[in-house]
Amino acid sequence: MDDLHRLDTSSNRWEEITTTKGVGPERRSGHQAQAVQTRLVVAGGKNSTTEFRDIHVLDTAADPPVRVFAGCCCAPAGGIFES
């Protein structure tokens, strides 16, 4: 639950990203993720003891990818991307 992968569209295979700069989110499941241009936005989720209400952004255009933002949000418990 703390791994990061990308799809290589030329080979149609998933590759694990093992090196990033910055501090990533705590281990979690049930989170929301959205690609926005060259950034991956991850919001919310939970683990066995905590329901997270935070946002993390990974800049995938950098080599290695860089975690550029982490902050708190005031989203409803269901998540910020639900309608």
Image (spheres, grey):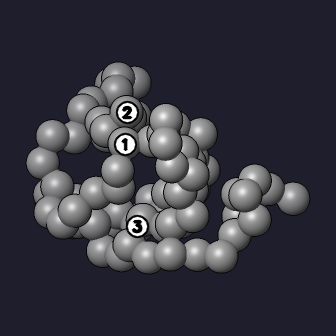
Residue type, numbered disc 3: Val
Residue type, numbered disc 2: Met
Quadrant position of the C terminus in the picture: bottom right
How many other residues sit within 10 Å of disc 1, few (<14), some (14-19) or many (≥20)? few
The percent coordinates of residue 71 (x first, y second) are 44, 76
Q: Find numbered disc 1 in the image and state the secondary structure of the residue it sits on.
A: loop
Q: Are marks 1 and 2 in contact (CB under 8 Å)?
A: yes
Q: Nearer the viewer, mark 3 or mark 2?
A: 2
Residue type, numbered disc 1: Arg
Q: Are marks 3 and 2 in contact (CB under 8 Å)?
A: no
Report the side of 37 relative to 10 (left or right). right
* Residue under pointer 1: 27
* Residue under pointer 3: 57
The percent coordinates of residue 81 (x first, y second) are 72, 60
The image quadrant that residue 3 belongs to is: top left
Q: CA distance from mark 1 to mark 2?
A: 5 Å
Examine the rendered structure and indicate whether residue 41 appears above or below residue 18: below
Residue found farthest to the right: 83
Q: CA distance from mark 3 to mark 2?
A: 17 Å
- The residue lying at 28 percent from left, 57 percent from top is 24
Quadrant position of the N terminus in the picture: top left
* Residue under pointer 2: 1
Q: CA distance from mark 1 to mark 3?
A: 15 Å
Question: Is residue 24 in view?
Answer: yes
